[in-house]
Amino acid sequence: STQQLVELIRNVGRKPIERDTLYHVVTDYSDIFFEDTKKPNNYKLPVVSNV
């Protein structure tokens, strides 16, 4: 997701900036902070057994 990519870029000390094919700035994520999103819980799937 965008949030994960921005966090990875920040963690290596770089500025998270989205650019187009001509290297123009599309979105500068330097000052944008995402809300903490809760990761989805894992659910057990039903198991069908052949009887």
Image (spheres, helix red, strand yellow):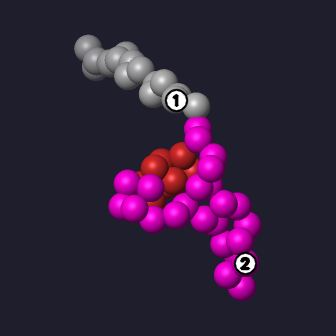
Q: Secondary structure at mark 2?
A: loop
Q: Which residues are magenta?
A: 10-34
List the residue tagged with mark 2. Answer: 24
Contact (CB < 8 A) between labels 1 and 2? no
In the foreground, 50 or 38: 38
The numbered dot on residue 19 is none
> Circle 1: is it few (<14), some (14-19), or many (20+) Cα within 10 Å?
few
The kind of residue tagged 1 is Asp
Query: Is the magenta region chiefly helix, strand or loop?
Result: loop
Q: Is residue 21 visible?
A: no
The kind of residue tagged 2 is His
User: What residue lies at 66% left-to-right and 72% top-to-bottom?
Assistant: 19
Q: Is residue 48 above or below residue 21?
A: above
> Would residue 40 appear left or right of 29 to someone viewing this image?
left
Q: Earlier in the sequence, mark 1 or mark 2?
A: 2
In the foreground, 10 or 43: 10
Q: Is residue 22 visible?
A: yes
Percent x, y of residue 38: 48, 24
> Would residue 46 appear left or right of 51 to someone viewing this image?
right
Is 30 inside the magenta-drawn segment?
A: yes
Q: Is residue 15 above or below residue 7?
A: below
List the residue tagged with mark 1. Answer: 36
Q: Secondary structure at mark 1?
A: loop
User: What residue lies at 53% left-to-right and 28% top-to-bottom?
Assistant: 37
Residue 12 falls in image quadrant: bottom left
Q: Is residue 42 above or below residue 23?
A: above
Image quadrant holding the C terminus, namely top left
User: What residue lies at 71% left-to-right and 85% top-to-bottom?
Assistant: 22
